[in-house]
């Protein structure tokens, strides 16, 4: 979550991984999409959904192409839908 002028907004999509669904380590995470790798929505990135399509993963998310984060409640309105693709299988980074 991002915080600007007292308002929260979504600014990235994260992935978490574990080999045991009953035990999670908060440090086992990585950014999937944020302002560093999204070319059209530089501030708002959120509400992801993922669907496997063949040997790729389609990630649908919402964003806003404005130069600045819209003020007030407008930061939660007037959003567009983005699509990103990841090749499968996904591989978790090593911690060496």
Image (tube, helix red, strand yellow):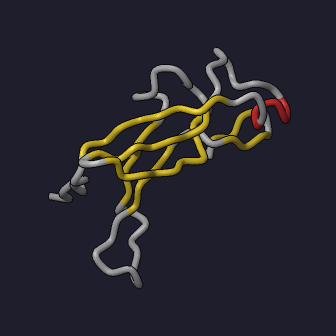
Q: Residue at (56%, 25%) from the top-left corner?
A: 41
Instruction: Determine the residue located farthest toward the top in the rendered image.
Output: 67
Image position of 50 with respect to 28: above or below: above
Q: Residue at (45%, 43%) from the top-left corner?
A: 59
Q: Residue at (40%, 28%) from the top-left corner?
A: 37
Instruction: Report which quarter residue 17 is drawn in.
Output: bottom left
- Residue 19: give x, y in percent of width and height: 28, 75
Q: How many marks?
A: 0
Image position of 91 with respect to 82: above or below: below
Q: Residue at (60%, 37%) from the top-left corner?
A: 62
* On-image quarter of the C terminus: bottom left
Instruction: Determine the residue located farthest toward the front in the rendered image.
Output: 54
- Residue 93: give x, y in percent of width and height: 22, 54
Left or right of 96 in this view: 43: right
- Residue 13: give x, y in percent of width and height: 49, 46
Front position in the image: 96 or 63: 63
Instruction: Determine the residue located farthest toward the bottom in the rendered image.
Output: 22
Front position in the image: 30 or 79: 79
Instruction: Determine the residue located farthest toward the left in the rendered image.
Output: 96
- Residue 32: give x, y in percent of width and height: 40, 44
Left or right of 30 in this view: 63: right
């Amino acid at each position: 979550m991002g915080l600007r002028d007292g308002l929260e907004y979504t600014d990235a999509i994260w992935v978490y991984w574990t080999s045991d669904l009953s035990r999670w380590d908060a440090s086992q995470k990585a950014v999937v999409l944020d302002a560093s790798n999204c070319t059209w929505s530089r501030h708002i990135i959120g509400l992801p959904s993922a669907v496997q399509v063949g040997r790729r993963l389609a990630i649908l998310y919402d964003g806003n192409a404005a130069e600045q984060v819209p003020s007030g409640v407008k930061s939660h309105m007037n959003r567009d839908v983005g699509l990103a693709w990841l090749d499968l299988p996904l591989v978790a980074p090593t911690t060496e």
